[in-house]
Image (cartoon, rainbow, N blue to C red):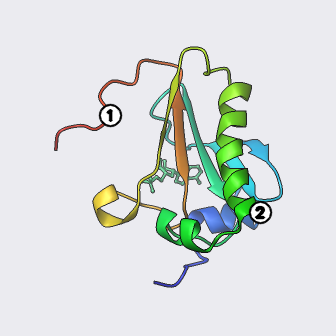
Amino acid sequence: MAYDDSNIFARILRGEIPCDKVFEDDHVLAFRDINPQAPVHVLVIPKGPYRSWTEFSATASDGEIAALVRAVGTVAADLGVVEQGYRVLSNIGADGGQEVPHLHLHLFGGRRLGRMIAAD
Ligand code: AMP
């Protein structure tokens, strides 16, 4: 499926919509989720036009992949959740519950996060 560059994260990356940025480098942007589910709830996204983990892992450069992984560690440290722990989660596709069709990693922390997934 083609990447839809009208999605909200593409618009944030183009500067058309503001975000509460916590980290940026050449390949990655991280910003606070607009509807936080925990005291710390940040979205870490590649700047490239990748819809899903499947596309990112198959076609992104090693540099882009390393940058995304490293950014998660940097953000967790910068936001002070390393000692108490945190959760990284990515929703992919329909069964994964993905709402925005631009790959993103959720980083949650700042409280006990409970079960990994809720019963339906
Ligand atoms: P997902 O269901 O994994 O696709 O998650 C999409 C996330 O994007 C949700 O947690 C939303 O609250 C968040 N979100 C949607 N629009 C924005 C926005 N403009 N700025 C920050 N987060 C957003």
- Tell whether circle 2 marks a residue whose Cβ is less than 8 angstroms from ligand 1: no
Q: Do we see residue 68 in this rendering?
A: yes
Which amino acid type is shown beneath numbered disc 1? Met
> In the drawing, what numbered circle is on residue 116?
1
x then y, percent, for residue 76:
65, 30
x then y, percent, for residue 77:
70, 26
Of helix, strand and loop, which one carries label 1? loop
x then y, percent, for residue 56:
57, 67
**Position above or below: 71 against 25:** above
> In the drawing, what numbered circle is on residue 15?
2
Left or right? Give the position of 5 relative to 113. Answer: right
The residue under the point 50% across, 63% down is 53
Which amino acid type is shown beneath numbered disc 2? Gly
Mark-to-mark CA distance, 2 and 1: 33 Å
Q: Identify the image quadrant of the C terminus.
A: top left
Task: Point out the residue furthest to the top here.
Answer: 83
Frontmost residue, 9 versus 107: 107
The residue under the point 67% across, 58% down is 65
Q: Badge 2: how crowded within 10 Å, few (<14), some, or many (20+)?
A: few
Left or right? Give the position of 14 relative to 84. Answer: right
